[in-house]
Amino acid sequence: MASSFKDICPVDVGPVYEGERIRSKEMQIEFGGPNVKYKFELVQVRDAGQIEDGKVTVIGPDIKDLQQGGSYPLGILVEIAGTQVEKDLEGVLERRIHEFTNFIEGVMHLNQRYDIWIRVSQSSFKKGLDSLRYIGNVLVRLYKAEFPIIEKIQVTYITDPEKVKGMYEEALKIYEARDSRARGLRDEDVEEFYGCVLCQSFAPTHVCIITPNRVSLCGSINWFDARAAARVDPKGPNFRVAKGELLDPVVGEYSGANAAAKEKSLGEVTRVYLYSMFGHPHTSCGCFEAIAFYIPEVDGVGIVDRNYQGPAVNGLPFSTMANQTGGGKQVEGFLGIAIEYMRSPKFLQADGGWNRVVWMPSYVKERVLDAIPENLRDKIATEKDVSSTAELREFLKARGHPVVERWKAVEVPAVVEGAAEAETETTVPELAIPVEGVPAVGGGIQLIFKNVKIKADKLIIKKVEKGKK
Ligand code: SF4
Ligand code: ZN
């Protein structure tokens, strides 16, 4: 594969470079990422007459013009045409920008849509990779090779800050239109679900099950998108999933989804709950926009997104929890999700849905505010309200959050007769959590937290097989 790109790109190209990570010390420059507000990538279907096939344009300063070590805004616009290319394909084709860009030696692409982060390494820059044009050339060739239905394609990189900003606003409207389309549909109303295994190159046991009420965790492929992709390219990473029997409407367990997960994970994952983060949660690769994490101290759920700086309310930063969550494992109490999934009527339905959510970053809360039931809006804390689980507990109590009711339900009588005096000063009532609600505790154990503060840099939870303890 590598040799076939020599005529259009100064560095190698191939799947071997896909997992490459470029640390800040090794980078020439980066586009997007946490230090840059305006960034996006977008695929748009056009009329053939609007496209000059194979053309790659850079609007604004190119890699060679930008200062080493800097972070810059970037918009990527891929325009395609073809008699069989439907508008429905835009989402899945857009997702491939990630994969194709990562094929280039010394180029790293993370995330998607409005959240992209691209780094170019110094070593590839020295080999001549000093223009976005080369990256565009590779995209053109890979798109055409992978999708013969694409008859014409042109790629535009926008680095001019003002232009990126303007187009970013437009792009947000386009993503919103795609997402809102699936909002009117319910899982019960469709005949079939879809799946995606694009991320198996990073997480070999990961299978996304995509339903109307459960958008993929990367947030960029919804049910309509996956359906369109499975139709045009049934052997590709998106495929049809027969629903089978609805085994449990509350947790969202379908025999067909189980079977698909089992087949595509080569037997590793056999059951998937679509609407729960406990029991048999959906696997997570690494592309999730946010993590839903269980907070045992309050028996509630926190949400932290990938752009959140600093530790979340449980003391753990996103990156630490991401290591715990990702990699294609099923980890009870940690679930990679898309922001859009929070809008689903089945969002963590089995776990209490919004009634169980106790903390999230203020800007995420702002973004999904209309999806939060009105009576809960002032009861969900953000980093502006609390900075520890002890404070969170007080906040929830003061605001009358519904999880407080759960504490009563599971609380174990704290004091033995006679020992009462010593115990009455307890500010954090002890809390016993039933096994079902606790990440990775097996075999009838009950965790009891008693005035405990847990701090950890890394949390390793291993699944213990029955009888192997
Ligand atoms: Fe596909 Fe899921 Fe990866 Fe998104 S996160 S690209 S839907 S496998
Ligand atoms: Zn992924």
Image (cartoon, rainbow, N blue to C red):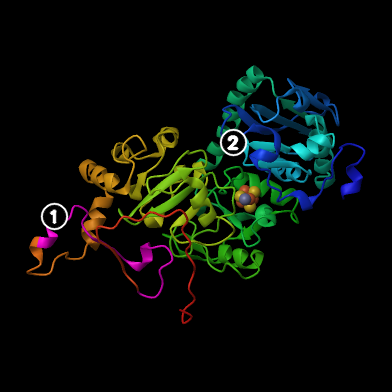
Q: Quadrant of the C terminus?
A: bottom left
In the image, residue 318 sits, relative to residue 449, either above or below, namely above
Q: Position of residue 109 (x, y in %)?
A: 68, 41
Principal secondary structure, stretch drawn in magenta: loop
Toward the top, the furthest residue is: 162
Q: CA distance from mark 1 to mark 2?
A: 47 Å
In the image, residue 144 sits, relative to residue 326, either above or below, namely above
- Amino acid identity at mark 1: Glu
Q: What residue is pinned by disc 2? A: 115
Q: Nearer the viewer, residue 132 or 451?
A: 451
Q: Is residue 338 magenta?
A: no
In the image, residue 409 sits, relative to residue 384, either above or below, namely below
Instruction: State left or right for residue 186 relative to residue 12.
Output: left
Q: Upstream in the sequence, badge 1 or badge 2?
A: 2
- Amino acid identity at mark 2: Asp
Q: In which quadrant of the rendered view does residue 278 lie?
A: bottom left
Question: Neighbour class for label 2 at 10 Å: few (<14), some, many (≥20)?
Answer: some
Q: Position of residue 89 (x, y in %)?
A: 70, 41
Q: Residue at x 49, y 52 (%)?
A: 321
Q: Position of residue 292 (x, y in %)?
A: 45, 50
Please provide the residue range marked out in magenta: 422-444
1 vs 2, front mark: 1
Toward the bottom, the furthest residue is: 467
Q: Residue at x 28, y 58 (%)?
A: 452
Q: Which mark is residue 425?
A: 1
Q: Nearer the viewer, residue 386 or 232?
A: 386
- Mark 1: secondary structure: loop
Q: Residue at x 62, y 39 (%)?
A: 112
